[in-house]
Amino acid sequence: MARHRNDGPGRSSPRRSRTVGALLTIAVLLGMLHVSTAQAATSDSATATASPGPHLVGQPITFTSTNPCTVACRLIWTYLNGTRLGVALGEGTSVTTSLSTHGLKTVELSLTETCVGTTRLVCSSVAVVSVDVQQAPPPPTTDSTAPAFALSGVEAEATGPTTPVLAVQARLDVGGTPVAWCEETVYEAVFVQDGRPARRRPLRIAA
């Protein structure tokens, strides 16, 4: 005689019960994970600053973490150059780097440590620092023009002790700009020979 299985509303198969139980277990675990993730946080917050400007292309810039860690942590620095991963700059309290192009540049500090209330989960806190990098000014030009020296004078025959016999003017130019000026006037000169005044004669000085 054939037996008929009754799966009416008042009964449920073991397979169905196991499936429902597994789904409920997964839902509970997902809910716990969601709560843990939402409530997890780092003990410390990432904060950072850059060395004072002006910041120039090719010149070193130092980025420093300004909030010391109170628990074991990692401080990871990344230059955000527009790529997916950026450029790793190193780890530690500070890093020094130089940038090869001008413009607004951003560096990220990632602080990672054990999440609050856990012993295995790792959480992170992120801070970013932006600096305006400018083109370095061109080096000063050196004037290679040789200094110019001009000398002019007027000669006259001495006729008295107050008669000027030579007036000399001198000027020194550097790069076309006068930097020194001198003017001198020579009066009558008396030459002594054997203790007696020699014959008065015009004083001539070759320039």
Image (cartoon, rainbow, N blue to C red):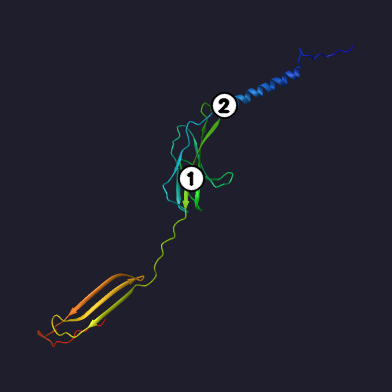
Residue at 50% over, 51% down: 103
Q: For the view shown, which residue lies furthest in the left direction?
A: 195
Q: Give the image quarter of residue 23.
A: top right
Q: Is residue 133 left or right of residue 2?
A: left
Q: Which residue is mark 1?
A: 130
- Quadrant location, the N terminus: top right
Q: Is residue 57 left or right of residue 189?
A: right
Position in image of residue 196 (x %, y %): 9, 85
Within 10 Å of the Cα at label 1, are there few (<14), some (14-19), or many (20+) other Cα atoms?
few
Residue at 22% over, 76% down: 184
Q: State the residue in front, 53 or 124.
A: 53
Q: Give the image quarter of residue 142.
A: bottom left
Q: For the view shown, which residue lies furthest in the bottom direction?
A: 199
Report whether residue 194 is seen. no
Q: Which residue is mark 2?
A: 36
Q: Is residue 100 left or right of residue 172?
A: right
Type of amino acid at the residue the image marks with label 2: Ser
